[in-house]
Amino acid sequence: MAARTRWVVLGGSFIAYMFDALEIILLSLALPAIRNDMHFTPLQGGLLATATLLGIGLSSVLAGYLADNFGRKKALIASLVTFGLFTAVLAFVPNFELFLLFRFVAGFGLGGVWGVVSTYVVETWPAPKRGRAAAFVLSSFPIGGAVAAVMSGFFLPDWRLMFLVAGVAVIVPVLIVVFAFDESSEWTQEKAKRAAAGDVRNVSVAQIFTPSLRRTTILATLVAALALTGWWGASTWLPTYLTTERGVAPATVAVYMTVLNLGMFVGYNVFGMIADRFGRRPAIIMTLLGVGVTLPLYALTSNLTALLWFGPLFAFFAAFTGLFGSYLGELFPTRVRTTGAGFCFNVGRGVSAFAPLALGALTAVMTLGSGLLICAGIFLVGALVMFLLPRTGDEPDAVQQPRGSLSATA
């Protein structure tokens, strides 16, 4: 693969996934203004976020089908256009029902971006550099969060104009993909090979549940669900925890969350290098153990200075999402790579949609600090399940997947 192609994919995918993060986080920042303007109840506000994550969870089937049957480039363009369009039309939404529907459909596009850019990186970067490349691309998530914070400060309380601008701006990554991205040569060669052999069957999600891949698919989905449930449960309620149970002023909470995002950005890239040096699976286990140990420190301390340091330390270890990008893609052969990786990660995101609601319900019988301890336990369970999955790529004792074959043993 030409060096130019690798770097174009790296930079373009970074920008595309940054917009993915931007669109997700804008809703949480705009929710108070939306509720005030449209008189939504707290339950309705929570359902908007849940609908987005459920759409993301279901996207794994559609986006994987498009990418594995019609090409990575077409699937990425379709994903970007979908969430850009359905974000822009929120500027004109008249009621809760349409708002809920538009966020659900936007989720289909948002979920597709993760799977396709991860696959692009796996198929364009050599194995010894693939971990850090995928982690760098996915480290754009906290950057997107920072951009969302700037946009909200500039536009709110005019949330309608904010969503219109954010949706229209997606034209930037769309143009980059249309004019600068080449189709994955690995996918093209594999498709041509199958066509020459007379195999014209379309890829379907059922193929990642064949006997050779079923165990890997189930375990990888379980790990993603555990990791993302712990993350969304903890991160959604951290600002409230700091304000209500630790007495941190709202302005200071904003500083804490900014520092936390910086810690996450650094963690993604550091653990990307660790993944290439020591292996994807050990690096993911390290991150899950790290968040499982540091989150209780964050939940139990009342010292404000310690909180300022434990926050970015916790976020530093929350790099598993970036590592999943290369690891999950390597678990599956070329033919079903986007379907497999996208299914595992996005079904996990769909399951995690209920984490904020569940943790909020638990506050009726326990403190938020206790809820954060439960999230820490979920992270540790995820680390244990990771031991049941194989090593990949160039790691010692790795399971080598035949490219383009469905007979791979996982």
Image (cartoon, rainbow, N blue to C red):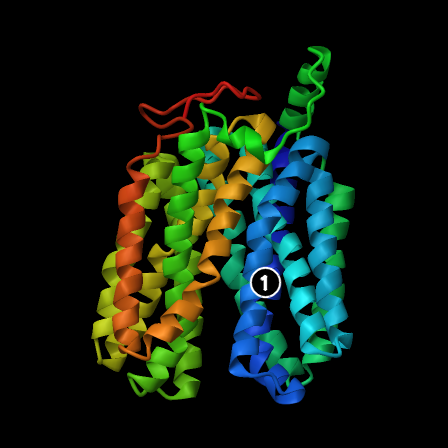
Percent position of residue 296, x then y: 23, 66
Say if residue 169 shows up in the picture: no
- Name the residue beneath numbered marker 1: 52
Residue 274 in the figure: left or right of residue 110: left
As helix, strand or loop, the secondary structure at mark 1 comes to helix
261 lies left or right of 379: right
Tell me the residue at 31%/54% (across/down): 379
Q: Nearer the viewer, residue 359 or 168?
A: 359
Between 107 and 204, the one lying in front of the other is 204
Q: Residues within 10 Å of mark 1 (few under 14, many from 20)?
A: many
Residue at 63% over, 82% down: 34
Who is closer to the viewer here, 320 or 351?
A: 351
Quadrant showing the C terminus: top left
For the N terminus, the image quarter is top right
Residue 399 screen position, x and y as percent = 38, 23
Residue type, mark 1 in image: Thr
Q: Residue 201, image x and y in percent?
A: 69, 23
Determine the image quadrant of residue 4: top right
